[in-house]
Image (cartoon, helix red, strand yellow):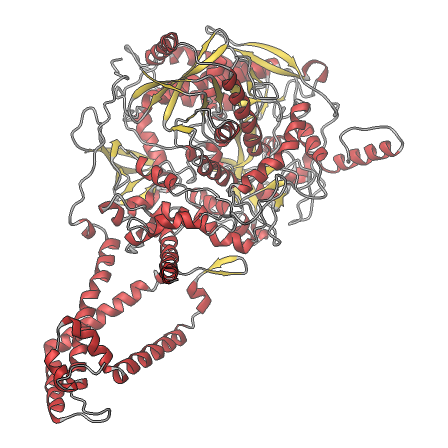
Amino acid sequence: MTMDLDKSTRKPFVRPVEASWWTKKGFYLAYMLREGTCLLVLAFVLEMLGLYIMTALHITDIQHMNQAGLESLQSYIKFLGHPVMIAFNVLVLIAVLYHAFTWFPLMPKATRVIIKDRKSGLYKLLEGKYLVALLVLAFVATTAAGIIFFYYPQLIAKLLTPLGLFEDALKGLFGSKGLPF
Amino acid sequence: MDVVKADVAIVGAGGSGLRAAIAAAELNPELKVALISKVYPMRSHTVAAEGGAAGVARDDDSLDYHFHDTVAGGDWLCEQDVVDYFVHNTTRELYQLEHWGCPWSRRPDGRINVRPFGGMKVPRTWFAADKTGFHMLHTLFQTSTKYKSINRFDEHFVLDILVKDQQVYGVLTLDMQNGVVRMIQAKSVIIATGGSNRCYRFNTNGGIVTGDGMALAYRHGVPLRDMEFVQYHPTGLPGCGILMTEGCRGEGGVLTNKDGYRYLQDYGLGPETPLGHPKSKYMELGPRDRVSQAFWQEQQKGRTIKTHLGDVVNLDLRHLGADYLEERLPFICELARAYVGVDPVKEPVPVRPTVHYTMGGIETNGRTGTRIAGLYAAGECASVGIHGANRLGSNSLVETVVFGRVAGEEAAKFAAENAHTDTEPLVKVAQESLDKALSVVSGERNESVSQIRNEMGDAMEEGIGIYRTEESIKKTIEKLTVLKERYKNIKVNDQSTIFNTDWLTAIELGFLLGNAEAMAYSALNRTESRGSHQRLDYTERNDEKFLKHSLATYNPDGAPTITYSDVKITKLPPAKRVYGIEAENAEKAAKEAQAKGSSINGGNQ
Amino acid sequence: MADKMKITVQRYRPEQDQQPWDQSFEVEYTRETSLLEALNQIKDTQEPTLSFRWSCRMAICGSCGMMVNGVPKLACKTFLRDYAGQEMRIEPLANFPVERDLVVDLSDFIEKLERIKPYIIPKKDEPQPGEQREYIQTPAQLEKYRQFSMCINCGICYAACPQYKINKEFLGPAALTLIYRYNEDSRDGGKEERMKLVNQDTGVWSCSFVGYCSECCPKGVDPASAIQLGKVESAKDYLISMFKKGE
């Protein structure tokens, strides 16, 4: 036998990583799609922000909106009524539902439920009371959002200021002295 | 040739090897410990042990009971002083594993739980569900990473131990990944390579359990002791041989034949115990040799079940319920579902006896030392003397840590007292060994490794199975002789140096053939029936002639020489080995005799 | 009756080959035949130079991880019957360098397991039990980490993990799971040391929760869960350290 056992002939082969690796497996593709939904959600947030700016920036006092505000709001609503925008919103809804449903089986992994000395699952704990959980969650989320948006518009404005957005509009709203906080 | 110097070299990194390494590192952190294994440590076959490890833990148990169960279970072929040391150290070692993180199953109050096992008077089997060996091995491996002085040589195949003038000086290894030979010069060497059950075709063992260490010690003149005692585990899956732990029966599982009858009551293990209420030493909690033999008897009577995977009986666990099975025997459920398509919750599991354990092994003294200075052996590869003619379930897992530790400490002491010798002459010895190993693969040859291996496995099953006769053993010996001759002409196709498993399996086959011969000749010469060695032509135990260890000594050209050595009896003189109601009656009689004033050893404390 | 299966195995012989190539075999199989048995059948009767790791045959030693039609699996727990009517393509475990045929270089994985201090580090302020006594650990305390102690180190989760695929510095599923296993053990006092590794860029925050590791784990360890729980711990750690800085 002609083996040379004094010098190593080792030559590991490192397989290259293809850029398209995530398209080769359903599981990876599903994951990438879920991650991708964030882009649509971002666009949707901008859409909502537009709505907010069109209205909140023209509120003269807490109950009333000035004429300019009403007009810009109407034009924005018209813009939203465009078939392209409706299609976009349907797409966002599908994306969000996709995210929610594929996230559903993953979420319990971040929790640890032990009942009677044995591991149990988060959903087992809820025992099918998903609707209740969902309603509670929706109530809490909308209340919190409502409070923030309608009682603290300045806070939102402040958050936007560093981005240099809407500076003029804000100045118009709060006077040339700048922001009141 | 690459040369590495160490103080202690340990061959094998299963339970015993890892425990030895830690013991050596703790006793003397100055010593360099080389831990060598042909696989990564967590692949070692300790990993497959399921049921548990024995250690006296309950208030109603005693060291004397453990001693008595072990010696009687071994049909009095145990070294009683060694058993005594063993039972005194099991619990300490198991607690040590607990301190290292082993996830033992617990009682509600947070203390260790124990389960009953076969041949045990009081439940004393510590368990981690049904993956005890797995958890012990991983605990030991992970703990071993704490010690800087332990230097691992993973995937290093040991080709030979280096012996000169009856002293060991290291080992010759093949680094499988790099394809280079590496001599590890050491002052002391521990062999901890496990059993040799791959001599048989159907076994519960992994492919790596090829008795390498046994064969190496054997070839260097250390006798293999009590090799005829090969344990058939009563409950392996048909076809693949995968183990269904004795814990199944410990938890209350029962064995039934084709008529649904609990046949063990017909073989000195009865009377029948109520379903779901296992009773120590009764019925399904009889010792392994007896339960396996009962299967053979049933088979002769035509009362086993015929399947396309051979004859089986049923292991019925259904009455334990899904929840309890999921808690206590989850792995069993997983295995049965995957490998025979049976859900133990709903159906009985088909099982048959399967080769499981080599009771014999490298002859050592009670401190794991061999006849070669500096060479120690521990675990299944060794015959330290605690298993006798039949090992009790859960004694071997704890043996790995009790005697692994002893070996580690003894080898460390020896290494500290001795200096390294010149390397050059050792390299020469190593080169000779290497040439021998390489000679297996040179020249024009035509015999197939797998064919010889299969024929050996079948011959061993046929001739040296649960029951043996002179005729059957002789037939197997003839076959082995032919196979050894054919082995000289074995063909290795693979010429690569990197992960050349073709070559290594050929070398392993050489190890197995030698060990098989030691088993066969030891079995032929023991003309009595004792424990797992049952002769149909000599059905009785013969203490006068055979209360002795068999010693198989290697002869390079031809059959091993079989001689005998004495068995150390300290406090429990040989008596009839009884289980079931017979045992209870015998115990009563003994108690009465004791009450009358005579002194009987080995009873209550 | 035995059926037939075409099995294509990716071969790589370091001394002869510049890159891997395919070799196909036909094997007979029955209901019980595992992929491991089929490979052994190939090695014994058709191609003795085919190299692969294996030992226990019962899904506990962790040796025989390999890619089966692109999915990382244990060969011994993969059955040909489940691929009836298809072909099987076997490759070495993904994301590891190939040493030869189906044998991969696991040294990076093993080194990571060792790096995380996978052993009990006794608590400094609590006495340890004596030689003949255990730590008290209730079944509920055991349950907190039990599942995460079931890892057989087969490396399948690393082959499943896209993060490990693109960043070999990532500690990876099994090592992070092992950290969580010891951190949650009521006997252990080493959490603070191990959290340093968890908090690093190469720790839990390299995980983007693809979840395929848990999908492929042959022992139901659910490493993705251990990592997400590790993120919770890491976040807590971060908050606490913010308060500590303020002191």
At a point 86% along the width and 31% down the height, the residue shown is B593
Q: Along the line of sight, which residue is nearer the eye, C195 or C185?
A: C195
Residue B408 coordinates in the image, percent (x, y): 52, 25
Q: Is residue B357 visible?
A: yes
Res C102 quadrant in image: top left
Q: What residue occupies the far right of the structure in this picture? A: B596
Q: Along the line of sight, which residue is nearer the eye, A97 or B521?
A: A97
Q: Is residue A45 above or below residue B306?
A: below
Q: Is residue C161 above or below residue A160?
A: above
Q: Along the line of sight, which residue is nearer the eye, B131 or B29?
A: B29
At a point 66% along the width and 42% down the height, the residue shown is B57
Q: Quadrant of the N terminus of chain A?
A: top left
Q: Is residue C132 above or below residue C138?
A: above
Residue B228 coordinates in the image, percent (x, y): 57, 20
Residue B382 coordinates in the image, percent (x, y): 54, 22
Q: Is residue B346 visible?
A: no
The number of numbered badges drawn on the structure is 0
Residue A99 coordinates in the image, percent (x, y): 26, 65
Q: Quadrant of the C terminus of chain A?
A: bottom left
Res A5 quadrant in image: top left
- Left or right side of B395 for B13: left
- Left or right side of C157 for C60: right
- Left or right side of B432 for A6: left
